[in-house]
Image (cartoon, grey):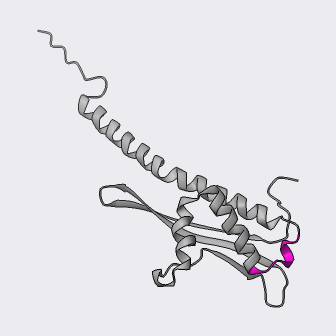
Amino acid sequence: MRTSIKKQAGATMVAWMIAAGAGILAGSAVIKVVPHYMEFNSVKGMMKTIASEPGIKSADKHQINRKIEKYLSLNSLRGLEDSFYGSRDKSSGKKNPFKVSRLKKGNKRQKLSVEYPVVTKWFANMSFLLDFKHSVVLGEPDNTTGK
């Protein structure tokens, strides 16, 4: 008597459903997070542009902050809106994410830096917390272009 035992080849419907669910969750996470990274790249580009402007070495903090405000109002950067525009209300406890500081004491060179968190809701009671930080030296040419 011959008995033929066939082994299953391929995935079951349950396995396909689990894989599809995991793929949908991963895709929704990417859709939620990627726009904030694109916005941060725009902020870095703005900072490089400001740092390479002629005469920026001698500009004071107020002039630099006006340039930043002008750029932000033109480009509608959502992640910075709460941090930057909320800074005018002292009772909110929010601070300006952009800082202009000296590199070293007694040094004339200035550094423009940004640091801000972004919290974005994802699924049910889960959120993503993204911390962005970047700094540039004012008055120095952009060395990232490979020249």
Q: Is residue 77 left or right of residue 50?
A: left
Q: Residue at x 65, y 58 (%)?
A: 74
- Picture quarter containing residue 59? bottom right
- Residue placed farthest to the left in the image? 1
Residue 54 lies left or right of residue 119; in this view the side is: right
Q: Residue at x 59, y 57 (%)?
A: 76
Q: Nearer the viewer, residue 3 or 116?
A: 116
Q: Is residue 37 above or below residue 4?
A: below
Above or below 16: residue 33: below
Name the quadrant containing residue 111: bottom right
What residue is rendered at 88% in x and 53% in y? Answer: 147
Tell which residue pokes out farthest to the top in this image: 1
Position of the N terminus by quadrant: top left
Quadrant hosting residue 14: top left
Q: x%, y% of residue 69?
A: 66, 68
Question: Residue 95: x and y, percent?
Answer: 55, 79
The one nearer the camera, 102 or 22, is 102
Q: Which residues are magenta?
A: 55-61
Q: Is residue 136 magenta?
A: no
Q: Residue at x 54, y 59 (%)?
A: 78
> Number of numbered discs present?
0
Location of residue 57 in the rendering, given as x and y in whole percent from the top left corner: 85, 75
Q: In the image, is residue 38 above or below residue 83?
A: above
- Location of residue 59 with respect to 47 vertically, above or below: below
Q: Does the segment drawn in magenta span residue 57?
A: yes
Q: Is residue 59 left or right of residue 128?
A: right
x and y, in percent, of residue 89 in the image:
51, 80
